[in-house]
Amino acid sequence: MDILYTCPAWGIMEWFELDDNFEKQAERIKEAGYDGIEMWAPRNDEERKQLDTILERYGLMFNVGMGTGGDTLKEHLESLEEGMRDAALGGAKTVACHSGRDIFSFEDNLEIVKRAADLEAELGIRFTHETHRMRMCYNLPDTVKFIEAEPRMKLNADFSHWCCVHESDLSDQTEGLNKCIAKSWHVHARVGHQEGPQVTDPRAPEWHDIVEKHFSWWLDIIKARQADGLEYFTVCPEFGAPNYMVCVPYTGQPLADQFDINKYIKDELKRRTA
């Protein structure tokens, strides 16, 4: 199984702006050893052609990050379909979606899950729901309920959020976590902790234990998908930019370099899966 690493556009370029900076960053991403970029889908044929040209020039693949939006279930379903069709036309290998809302009922969110599974089958594109705060999969127990109600559901595992939501390293929810690992088809490789969704710097010794916990989850997911016989699996190291990254008060200076941290996560995971 090929493990493909994508660099998030978040923090280094606009999610979809095909300007000079985009091409400069595409070259930087390739030089840093990534296989592709994760960003919003192009919005029309002209943008798709421009994106294809740049990706082909640098030998990069394309993953889509998207979210459902609106105030009602109907609006979320409409944005889901629009986003998935754009992703499919853009040639994305994997879609990572911020799906639904934490304030919607279980039944409404489940309708989004079922519709996504139908569209995934129709369009032939790998679609994953991110385990993200504010969204339907903001906590572990509710996510397990969705998985049990719709076996076709696939997850984008970003367990950093759950560490924050549950104020734990999830060792008290092993059974549920294993069910989610079995349904994880994409990884957002960020390290969270009991008091927040992102450690300041995963290379710092004070974070050693929780960093190792996350690496063990990612490796378990990769092993599970390898056992399934997948042709490829996608990982996006996704430490966030300021103000998601903690900054020094008054100056706004970030405590670490986002691009360097994500490259470190990629390189270390590559080393551990070699």
Image (cartoon, rainbow, N blue to C red):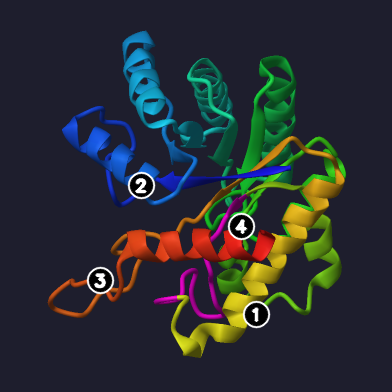
Of labels 1 and 3, earlier in sequence is: 1
Please tell me which residue is depicted at 22% across the width and 79% down the height of the picture. 248
Q: Residue furthest top?
A: 45
Secondary structure of the residue carrying tag 2 is helix
Circle 2 is placed at which residue position?
Answer: 31
| 3D distance between C-alphas at marks 1 and 3 | 26 Å
* Residue 259 can be seen, yes or no: yes
Please tell me which residue is depicted at 85% across the width and 39% down the height of the picture. 151
Q: Amino acid at mark 2?
A: Glu
> Which one is nearer the viewer's eye here, 273 or 102?
273
| 3D distance between C-alphas at marks 4 and 3 | 26 Å
**x and y, in percent, of residue 42 in the image:** 39, 22
Q: Residue furthest left?
A: 251
* Residue 244 can be seen, yes or no: no
Circle 1 is placed at which residue position?
Answer: 168
Of labels 2 and 3, earlier in sequence is: 2
Please tell me which residue is depicted at 79% across the width and 72% down the height of the picture. 173
